[in-house]
Amino acid sequence: MEDKKPFFILIASQKGGVGKTTIAINLAVSLIYQDYKVLLIDSDIDTASLANYLGIKGSGKGYKEAMTGEAEVGDVIFAYESANLHLIVGNTADNAFTPQTEKLNRFYTQLQKMDYDFVIIDTPPGYFNEYMAKYLNEVIIVTTPDEASASSSSKLSAYCAKFKVEHRMVINRAGYSKFELDKEGVERLFGDVAYAIIPEDRTVQEAVAKHKPAYMIDEGSPFSLAINELSRAFTLKVGQPVETKQMQREEDRKLGLFGRLTKWSSKPPE
């Protein structure tokens, strides 16, 4: 049987400052809390926003070295212990850096062989490298609900459609302005593209100040509940985590047939 490849999610935006990294980090943590194995990658070497957000200092080699072949992919992955989250950070480069196609293919081919359920890639604002498209299962386009930001994001939606990459919109910080687009305005811009609404929430501001994922501060906040709904769109596609399935099989084996029948008969009616 062929080994299961990770589900690749790319987080994109047409402009900066819309909360792309916030969505990437908290989506990763939400999936981890559901027992999925997640690798989060910061491919933005201009700002290294992932490391800044989590307060990571002196992380050494990262995305750029893995992409150029200066380091093996496995050697630049480290754990953010607070959430059991595996990271490849984007250490800031002195000069402009564009990955060579050959190196990019090598990098993503190696990632496909790794034991993760999800690989989430936080990208710099703008169009992602077209050669990445064949590795992606889905793109999340993050925007805020103001018309200028949402309108520019429609170009990124068209870019995804050009390369036949499945994508969905995330309307972040909904409710922070009385001048934001309504449901009809969003649908007018993006047509039948799926979208999620993430509300404005003070928990996110607290998280930024504490260098900690908002999901870990308050799982019951409006922001975290919306992130859970977003994560559900992906867990439905990949099914249960492998370890959860194995644990259930082991439990059933120990129970035996009579035990399983008792277990099933004791379930409350749906």
Image (cartoon, rainbow, N blue to C red):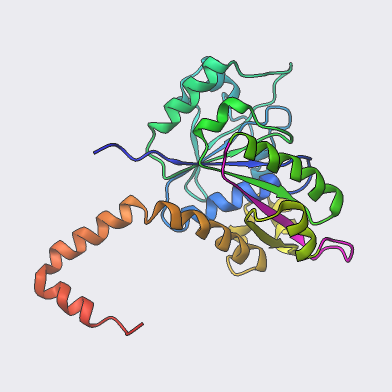
Residue 42 left/right relative to 75: right
Relative to 257, is 243 above or below? above
Q: Nearer the viewer, residue 192 or 37?
A: 192
Q: Position of residue 189 (x, y in %)?
A: 77, 53
Quadrant of the image occupied by residue 123 = top right
Q: Is residue 180 magenta?
A: yes
Residue 218 visible in the displayed image:
no
Question: Which portion, as a residue range, is magenta?
Answer: 164-181
Query: What is the tally of numbered marks visible in this picture?
Result: 0
Whether residue 49 is visible, yes or no, is: yes
In the image, 39 versus 8, the foreground residue is 8
The percent coordinates of residue 134 (x first, y second) are 51, 31
- Is the residue 11 above or below the residue 83 in the image? above
Quadrant of the frame with the C terminus: bottom left
Image height of 193 relative to 86, above or below: below
Task: Find residue 27 and report its horizontal and vertical position in percent.
Answer: 57, 52
